[in-house]
Image (spheres, rainbow, N blue to C red):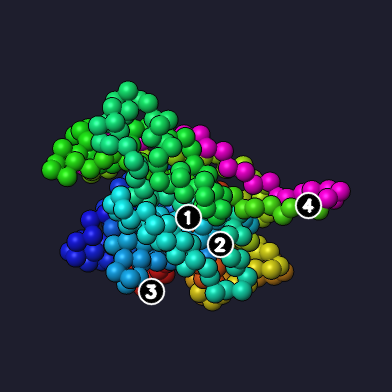
Amino acid sequence: MNCGIMSLLSDTAFEDPWSSFFMDVLSPLSFVKVSSVRMQGLLLLIFAKYQHLPFIQILSTKSTPTGLFGYWGNKGGINIFLKFYGYYVSIINCHLPPHMANNDQRLEHFDRILEMQNFEAQDIPNILDHDLILWFGDMNFRIEDFGLHFVRESIKNQCYSDLWEKDQLSIAKRHDPLLREFQEGPLLFPPTYKFDKNSNNYDTSEKKRKPAWTDRILWRLKRQPQAAVHTPTPSAPHFTLFPRSYVSHMLYSISDHKPVTSTFDLELKPLVSAPLITLLPESLCTEESDLLISYSLTADFLSSPWDWIGLYKVGLRHINDYVSYVWVRDNQVSFSDGLNQVYIDISDIPETEDQFLLFYYSNNLHSVVGISKPFKIQPHSFLAEGPLDEAQPQI
């Protein structure tokens, strides 16, 4: 991210360019921006297909600066912590100290970021008890001992095995019990730093920095409790991560780093299989310029006067992209045991063949807790016209 002061001010007032770009690319594929957190040059975005939204609860976003004795965010980590189908997941993006001699400082910052990710809420477990930690970023680990010529020749001949042995992160994982619990895919791609900008040439400046795998993607699955001798192993919930790819992308040359991506398959047995709110598309009907909505809620769902239902076109980019909305308490028509009806004024919606969705947003949980199936609004429902005059809900 551009962390100049004008860029920071602009991104505070408007959507940052990376969010806008990814929303444009991913929304036609049914992905919705769920959450984001930024600290100067670090940005972390989470997108999910909309059918998963009722099972994703964003519990916290956090920034941990480690630059300038912990006061400056040019180095450090940012975290989005969520519950996904009942499992606890932490996603961390980091930027650790640079330069060959600062390996101990990198490891210290790694530990500090991890220590600062604990949460005050009593019902949230320690981060090391989370089911999954995804940790990635510019970790700045370097290749020790070997000279520049040997490293470049090894890269040219795609002989990486000797370089792996001297990779500072690999060495640290062999000695640090906690770091050893983080897994990484095989480094089968060339070191991703440092390149001349707009080229595939390693650093030709006067400094001639030695190439290194600075940009890494790690993950850690929760430790399962050890069974006592002669005691059957307890049956743990099924939650497994399978790495599919771990590659760099040499075509991109706008930075002195090459971007790195990883793809995973997450296989799980849901701990939560039913949404808290069920919106009933078969009960949708129109009366004059109102769209009548029936919904049911589970017994343990705590509603709020600030809960709202949004009407969206299929292909939305973000939860704030509603076409219309209603505060559920204000426009309630009827309610009974577990079944409620509200209406949305659709008089300002132009006649269209688009499909729509309904989202129920919980103010207490700060997340979507119910989604309807896609549907169309019948043309005869477009009668009156009149702007909405209520304050718009914001996330």
Mark 3: few, some, or many residues within 10 Å (few <14, many ≥20)? few
338 left or right, relative to 162: right
Q: Which residue is mark 1?
A: 91
Q: Mark 3 vs mark 2: which is more N-terminal?
A: 2
Q: Mark 4 vs mark 1: which is more N-terminal?
A: 1
Q: CA distance from mark 1 to mark 3?
A: 33 Å
Q: Which mark's residue is nearer the viewer, 4 or 1?
A: 4
- Residue 219 visible (yes or no): no
Q: Which residue is mark 4?
A: 227
Q: Is residue 165 above or below residue 367?
A: above
Amino acid on which the number 3 mark rests in the picture = Ala
Q: Which mark's residue is nearer the viewer, 3 or 2?
A: 2
Quarter of the image where the C terminus is located = bottom left
Q: Position of residue 89 (x, y in %)?
A: 55, 56
Amino acid on which the number 4 mark rests in the picture = Ala
Label count reads 4
- Residue 241 visible (yes or no): yes
Q: CA distance from mark 3 to mark 2?
A: 38 Å
Per the image, label 3 sits on a secondary structure element best described as: loop
Q: Which residue is mark 3?
A: 391
